[in-house]
Amino acid sequence: MERIQTAIAKGRAARQGNLQGNALTVPQSKPPAPQDTGVIAAWSALPVAVIDERHFEAARIVAHQPGAHANPYDLMRTTLMRHLREQGWSRVAITSPGGACGKTTTCVNLAFSLARQSELRVMVIELDLRRPAMMKTLGLEGGARMAAVLAGTEPPERGLVRFGPNLAFGTSASAVANTAELLSSTQAAAAVDMIEERYKPDVILFDMPPMLVIDDTMAFLDQVDCALMVAASEQTTVDEIDRAGKELADQTTVLGVVLNKCRYLNAQDGYGYDGY
């Protein structure tokens, strides 16, 4: 455990050190630098997906446009961005204690909510590689290969697809083996760093596997700044939330717990979010 915590601390310090180092090279008296044409070109070169409204409705993807259904995710977005800006963070893991808690749906909706703020570049990377579900959730077809990107055998654009000018998803079309070994590898860490350098997203959401099912999430937590945990009302037990929360908090900063699938809350009960 001490080795893992030391690695997490070193990884976070290195990323923050790079941010601080970059900031010191820009005198405060100068106007903001012009937009990086290379980053704009990289985003423009990504394959573009079109929103299928009927599919999104069936998949419960609601935050791509403003409205009452998007309000809970907009609230989460605002609180999340406040934490990220205060700490200078950008990498957020989204996980759950067990399966079928709705973490992928939550992740996708949060991403669309974030991307409605046009000044933000948002990227989602699917790391639940034993049971990838994001392509189905988004209604995508094709041979996206984010696992191969992480393994260093494919360039980033082979795993990415763009919705609009400022939101991209890194997905996998099929399950892969040896995922814990892949996610804990230096190659996967380098691939994420390369994606971050090329596309310079303001926020990267990582759709992680459940905490209490396999060790894949633990293998990757040294690469993130913080985490959200999604629990399912009437399904996830208090003991599961406690155990997963403690394990998660041992490895990274837990920003909160999203209580999903609530059927009986009133409007004054905070849109079904607890501890966030």
Image (cartoon, grey):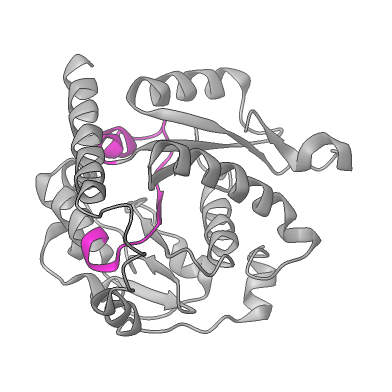
Residues drawn in magenta: 196-223
Left or right of residue 159: residue 148: left
Q: Which residue is located at x 59 percent, y 50 percent?
A: 77
Q: Residue at x 40, y 26 (%)?
A: 248
Which quarter of the picture shows residue 232? Answer: top right
| Residue 204 higher or lower than 167, as above or below | above
Residue 10 versus residue 19: which sits nearer the camera? 19
| Residue sitting nearer the eye, 160 or 77 | 77
Residue at figure coordinates x 46%, y 38% from the top left: 86
Residue farthest toward the front in the current orientation of the protein = 29
Q: Is residue 268 left or right of residue 174?
A: right
Please name the residue shown 46% across and 82% down the image. 49
The image position of residue 140, as x and y in percent, is: 46, 77
Residue 222 included in the magenta stretch of the image: yes
Is 188 situated left or right of 50 in this image?
left
Residue 213: x percent and y percent? 40, 34
Please tell me whether residue 96 belongs to the stretch shown in magenta: no
